[in-house]
Amino acid sequence: MLFPRTLTIISTTLVCAMISLSSASVQTAAGQQAEKIFDNGNVYAVQNRPTRPTVVVFNAPTRITQIMTYHWNNGRGSPAGTIALRSGSGETYGPWRTVGLPGQGGVPSAYWVALPDITVPPGTYTVIDSNPSTWAHNAATSGTGIVVAEGFAEVVQERGDPIGALQRVGTFDKARRIDVGRTAAGATACYFREAGSSHTLDIGLTAEGAFLRLETGDSRETTPAPPLRVFAGKQIAKGGYATNVFTVLQAYDGEIEFFTPKPEQGDFVVLAKGDAKRFFDMVARAKDEFVVVQSVAQPANTDIVAIYNFTTAAIPALLSCAKAHVGS
C-alpha cells in the first residue's frame, strides 16, 4: 500500500475544495498562507494500531487549518471519526469531526480530514484519534500514527501601550488612594495604584475609557486571542495545585480593547469602552482573587492579575476625580 506524501496530492475534487476553502479563510483572516507543519507520512506498508503516541511540537502560537490521520485498515478503511490534540498540561483541543475520503484504489474513508481552523499556544501536543485500532503506522514512523497537518505559526503583533507609565501630578483623594497623573501621550488620568515587589498595577480612567494596566517583570506564557472576555475569577485548585481554570465571579459585558505591549513579558492593558463603573465593579469583585482576560475559543489562554487592595470604596472617588479632571 502506497501512502501519499502530502495532503495536496490526494487526487479527489473534495480534498482540493477543502484545501482551497481552508487556505482562503486563512488568507482572509490572517494574511498568512497555510503550509505543512507536520508530516510523518511515507510510502511504505502500514499496520494498524500505533505502538507509540504521535507527538507534535509547536514553538509559537500556531493556527491549525487542517489535520489528517490515515486509516488503511488492510484495505477496508474505517468510518470517519474525530481528531483532537492534547497539550502537555492536559488541555484538550477538539475533538473535531472529520470527513472520510477514499484512499488509493478507492479504499473508503482511508483519509480522515478535519478543518479545525484554531490557534493553539506553543507547546507539545499528542494527537488523539478516535479509532486507534485502525489508525496506520509503520517502522518509518517509529510506531507513531500517521498524521499530516497544515497551518502556520501566527505572528504575534505588538500593540502599543495606550496608557504608558503614568506620571503622578497630584492627589485627588488621599484616603482612597486616588491620584491624578499624565499618560505617556500627555493625557490626564485618574488612577488607583497597587504595587508589589515585581509588578505595578494601575486601575483608572482617561478620556478613552476605564483601564487596567499591568507592568511586570514576569515572562509571558500565553496570549489570549480574540474574541475575549474579561471577568473577576476565582482560581480552581486540583490536587493542591493551582490550575488555569477559573470560576466566574462577575463578568464585564462591555466592549474592551486588549494590548500586550511587550510580547515576551506579561505586561498587558485592558481598555474598557463601555460603562466605567461596571468595569470598576468587576475589578473590585476580584479582590483577593484575579481579573482574568480569557480567549473565548481557547479558554486555557489567559492573562491574569491578582487584585489585593482595590475595593468598591475607591470607585466613587475615582469617578469624581475623572469628572473633575478628565471630563468623564
Image (cartoon, rainbow, N blue to C red):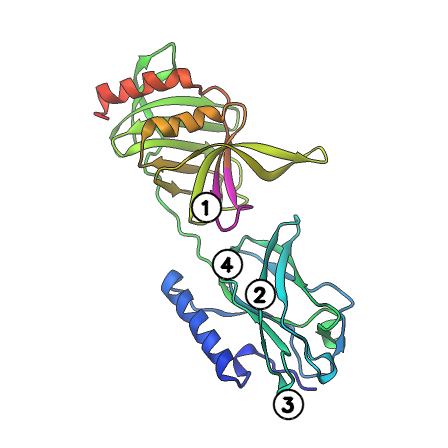
Alpha carbon separation for disc pair 2 and 4: 14 Å
Q: Which mark is residue 97?
A: 2
Q: Quadrant of the N terminus?
A: bottom right
Q: Which residue is mark 4?
A: 118
How packed mark 3 is, by other alpha carbons closer than 10 Å (few <14, some 14-19, many 20 or more), is: few
Could you tell me the amino acid type at mark 4? Answer: Ile
**Mark 1 or 2, closer to the camera:** 2
Question: Which quadrant would residue 316 be assigned to in this image?
Answer: top left
Q: Left or right: where does residue 7 sit relative to residue 242?
A: left
**On the rendered image, what quadrant is the C terminus found in?**
top left
Q: What residue does disc 1 label?
A: 263
Q: Measuring 46% from the left and 58% from the top, which residue is drawn there?
A: 154
Q: Secondary structure at mark 2?
A: strand
Badge 3 or badge 4: first in the primary sequence = 3
* Residue located 38% across and 30% down the image: 279
Residue at 43% in and 45% down: 228
In the drawing, does residue 228 fall left or right of residue 129? left
Q: Amino acid at mark 2?
A: Arg
Residue at point 55% right, 44% down? Answer: 221
**Residue on which disc 3 sits:** 105
The amino acid type of the residue labelled 1 equals Pro
Magenta residues (range): 293-303
| Residue type, mark 3 in image | Gly
Q: Residues within 10 Å of mark 2 (few under 14, many from 20)?
A: some
